[in-house]
């Protein structure tokens, strides 16, 4: 059974105010010369991150700033997984410190300069029978902040993430299998409502499976939501061309989301639902985006999609509680989660991998900044564990549909063929499938009706 490996008791033991928040025992963990190889005491760097978060929570901004300076000096984008992780969290804590010290009127020594840079060239994706061909380049010339805020860089990193880690492919493959098993082979019309389709990487394998399992193959219609009309239309064009190569009757309907209220478009008339279609609703890495300060918007969304009477609803989410209202709890949970993520990248990619650098800095770096530095309505990465989603889905009238042994077999094959590492672990729990690294679950996929 997956268990969290990072203890949260450390910050509880140090919650009492101390005369000198940065003690000599803290400083002895730091190598005197940052250019030297990491010392064994580098394992204590994550503890110093928690200490820094405690200082910020107590509004001891001056001491927090000094500790961030130490952390950023003794971490690097190009070190081992711990150094790279500490670098990202130090940057996020620096942003939080600046935001909170400015809003409170407190004076600090100023922002900590994170002297790193990365820029990703635009990446083209072409949908083939099984996956997308991805080329990605990194130009270490531009400022990190401008890169992280670039939609082009995020899209490019998403494609790299799909290539170098199993997380996206595992989610897509398992959700596809759940859809195939929920819809009878004899159905002549299938409608998939895909929330936040991105580049549509999920659908070529499903389209091929539908084309091969019955003759004539069914009519497939995908209604896809997104907030970028260009990406939506390019995705639709690629999928339409791929369907032609399979002889699959296919329609693509882009649905542009121009406001944050997704519930306004969930209507049978707006979605042009047909009574003869088998409806599948796909929410891969999506539901957490609907959580705000409360869950009312998400609960309304779930009630509305339940009223559409879908054959199946597929859900994939990260296995972490990044929605805790207390900042310190979120940081500890995020540190645990991303430690495993960075360790998996360290173990499976070469040290000079540009794709790994880009994914860590832009994709996961953006998530870490959101979880650590943002508050209130500005916080978007509100991941929750499977148990929280289960409670919410059942209260909205959904029942869990067990994933089949074949879904597990497919996931094992995916790992063996494309991501051969003993560190990745699969587990079926609560009729759902979990992918983790070593002893920690990182992603879950479940099926509902």
Image (tube, rainbow, N blue to C red):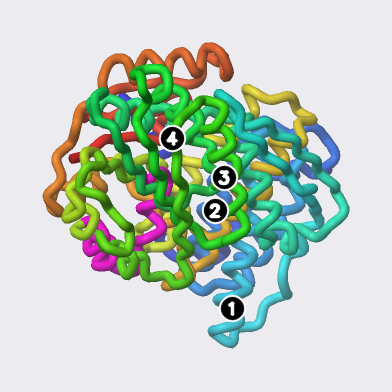
Q: Which residue is mark 2?
A: 367
The answer to whether the residues at label 4 and label 2 have Cβ atoms under 8 Å apart is no
Mark number displayed over residue 101: 1
Tell me the magenta residue range.
282-302
* Front label number (4 vs 1): 4
Is 357 situated above or below 166?
Answer: below
On screen, residue 89 versus residue 389, left or right, reads right
On screen, residue 431 versus residue 225, left or right, reads left
On screen, residue 236 versus residue 278, left or right, reads right
Lower sequence index among marks 2 and 3: 3
> Where does residue 427 sit, x and y in percent of width and height?
33, 22
Mark number displayed over residue 249: 4
Lower sequence index among marks 3 and 1: 1
Mark number displayed over residue 199: 3
* Front label number (2 vs 3): 3
Residue 335 colored in magenta in the image: no
């Amino acid at each position: 059974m997956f268990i969290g490996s990072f203890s949260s008791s450390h910050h509880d033991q140090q919650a009492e105010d101390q005369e000198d928040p940065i003690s000599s025992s803290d400083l002895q963990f730091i190598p005197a010369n940052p250019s030297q190889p990491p010392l064994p005491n580098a394992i204590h760097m994550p503890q110093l991150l928690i200490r820094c978060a405690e200082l910020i929570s107590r509004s001891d901004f001056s001491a927090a700033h000094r500790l961030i300076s130490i952390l950023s000096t003794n971490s690097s984008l190009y070190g081992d997984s711990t150094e790279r992780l500490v670098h990202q969290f130090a940057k996020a804590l620096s942003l939080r410190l600046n935001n909170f010290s400015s809003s409170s009127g407190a004076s600090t020594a100023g922002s900590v300069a994170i002297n790193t840079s990365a820029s990703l060239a635009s990446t083209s994706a072409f949908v083939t029978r099984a996956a997308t061909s991805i080329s990605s380049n990194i130009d270490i010339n531009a400022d990190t902040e401008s890169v992280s805020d670039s939609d082009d860089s995020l899209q490019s990193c998403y494609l790299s993430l799909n290539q170098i880690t199993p997380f996206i492919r595992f989610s897509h493959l398992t959700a596809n299998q759940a859809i195939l098993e929920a819809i009878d082979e004899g159905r002549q019309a299938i409608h998939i409502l895909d929330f936040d389709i991105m580049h549509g990487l999920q659908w070529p394998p499903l389209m091929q499976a539908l084309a091969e399992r019955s003759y004539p193959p069914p009519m497939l219609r995908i209604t896809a939501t997104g907030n970028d009309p260009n990406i939506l239309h390019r995705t639709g064009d690629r999928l339409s061309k791929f369907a032609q190569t399979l002889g699959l009757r296919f329609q693509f309907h882009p649905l542009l989301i121009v406001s944050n209220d997704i519930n306004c478009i969930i209507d049978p008339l707006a979605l042009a639902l047909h009574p003869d279609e088998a409806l599948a609703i796909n929410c891969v890495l999506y539901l957490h985006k609907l959580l705000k300060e409360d869950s009312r918007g998400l609960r309304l969304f779930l009630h509305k999609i339940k009223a559409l009477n879908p054959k199946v609803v597929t859900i994939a989410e990260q296995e972490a509680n990044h929605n805790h209202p207390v900042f310190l709890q979120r940081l500890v949970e995020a540190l645990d989660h991303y430690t495993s993520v960075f360790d998996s990248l360290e173990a499976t990619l070469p040290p000079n991998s540009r794709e790994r650098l880009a994914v860590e800095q832009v994709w996961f770096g953006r998530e870490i900044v959101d979880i650590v530095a943002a508050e209130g309505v500005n916080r978007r990465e509100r991941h929750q564990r499977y148990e929280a989603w289960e409670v919410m889905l059942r209260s909205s009238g959904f029942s869990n549909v067990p994933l089949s042994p074949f879904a597990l077999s497919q996931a094992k094959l995916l790992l063996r063929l494309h991501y051969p590492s003993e560190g990745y672990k699969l587990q079926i729990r609560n009729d759902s499938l979990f992918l983790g690294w070593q002893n920690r679950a990182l992603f879950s996929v479940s099926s509902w009706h």
